Amino acid sequence: MKVMTLALTMAGLLVGNAHATTYVVQSKTLNFSTALASQIEANGGRITARYPTMGVAIVEGDAGFRARAQSLLAVRSAVPNATLQFDIPESVPLDVGAMANPPNSGDNDTFFNFQWGMDAIDAPEAWALGWRGAGATVAVLDSGLACNHPDLAPNNLAALNASFVPGENACITTTAFNHGSHVAGIIAAPDNGIGTIGVAPQAKFFSVKVLSEVTGSGDFAGILGAIVYASDNGADIINMSLGVSGGIAQSPDNLELIQAVQRAVNYARGKNTTVIASAGNDAIDYDNETNPDGTHQISFPGGLMNVVAVSATAPEGWGVNPATNLDLPASYSNYGRRLIRHAGPGGDFDLPGSANCTVAGVTRPCWVFDMVLSPSTSTNSYSWAAGTSMAAPHVAGVAALIVGKAGGTLSPAQVELRLRAGADDLGPHPQGEFYRHGAVNAYRSVK
């Protein structure tokens, strides 16, 4: 069975997948001045985006532009932009019509009883203290949003939704499973008597599309621009449930593209935006896995500095025994203390056998209930899915609770400190390679 998550895939050489006329240009300093912009234009480049305090510009040019640009004294590099391809995850739909009364939620959110992840992070206990994310804003960098979904629209800051995918709007038009909607629902589905409840049900969020809902592609320039857009528009937290399958080799061009995105992450941190990302789903030990040349693989974007990389945990047989351990390392999750900051509920699908279980009036194969349920398409629908893509938004939701309690005034360092102080210590080596600073705990982080 495939890993049930969104995963970016790319060839070993990014240049082979690049848009031939689009370049990511970095200056040697963090200043991309108007004078340098004029030099770029004089050498045949057309600047489509410029980030002057990051020292980065997105430029269109002919095949010879790269050499001309890199001859300029102020230019560090001019690298062809790379397009990334992601796999559409497998998912299991839930028939809207099954009823379940959630414990201690204050509302009749009909599918709350399937949300074992909220129990795993003690979210209801945090809500009981009065902390539900009010005052926090999360940017979801993903594949768009089912903007009219009744369990997403109430907390969506629709005016801020944006797309960095040419020709596509932030609001999705397809009826297939939508990864971005699933992720957004985990973070901030409202406690409104409908469907599921997010970790931070009173937080606000906006969708920044960086991956196409049609072709499954996105590029470095789009991700970079989206990070800047999100932080410039008041995001306290950015969630990027994105991961390059198998990591990225350390070729010179790859490293320059990664460095450009690193500059964007650093820019966001300077704007008091905490960046959280999924760790990926290849079961790679990033402490020890190396490329043929002996260099370490790079996890992108989770492996960037100032990014909180999240591994996935899950129960095994929760539908059989709801009292089972909810914090087992997921079978597919990447790990390694060099990469992971925290673990969060991501779900799994490796329960042996095909026996059915019935939970809250819904019958499915027992392994389905070990996955994560959330809104999924433009209609009033919900699906189960699993991956570190589902783990990261649980952590982003806890971060929103922390920011909300503080009135929206915390720096990323303060948010990270509270995540770490509140996390559940789930043990030393080897499990420490999956959890590092612990599995997030909402209650302990805000009490």
Image (cartoon, rainbow, N blue to C red):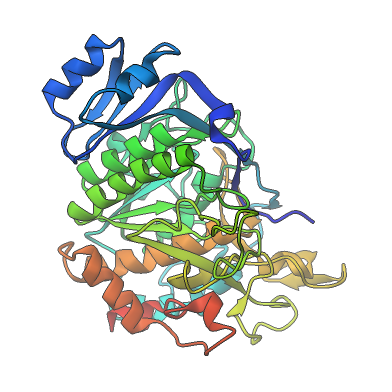
Front-most of 242 and 344? Answer: 242
| Residue at (55, 62) in percent of width and height | 110
Q: Is residue 324 above or below residue 109?
A: below
| Residue at (70, 56) in percent of width and height | 3
289 left or right of 192? right
Front-most of 291 and 215? Answer: 291
95 left or right of 230? right
On the image, the x and y values in percent for residue 272 come to 20, 57
On the image, the x and y values in percent for residue 66 come to 38, 21
217 left or right of 228? right
> Looking at the image, how many numbered discs can be counted on the residues?
0
Q: Report if residue 103 is visible in the image.
A: no
On the image, the x and y values in percent for residue 405 come to 22, 71
Q: Is residue 416 above or below residue 210?
A: below
Q: Report if residue 157 is visible in the image.
A: yes
| Residue at (55, 48) in percent of width and height | 248
| Residue at (22, 36) in percent of width and height | 55
On the image, the x and y values in percent for residue 54 come to 22, 40
Q: Is residue 345 above or below residue 384?
A: below
Quadrant assignment for the N terminus: bottom right
Quadrant assignment for the C terminus: bottom left
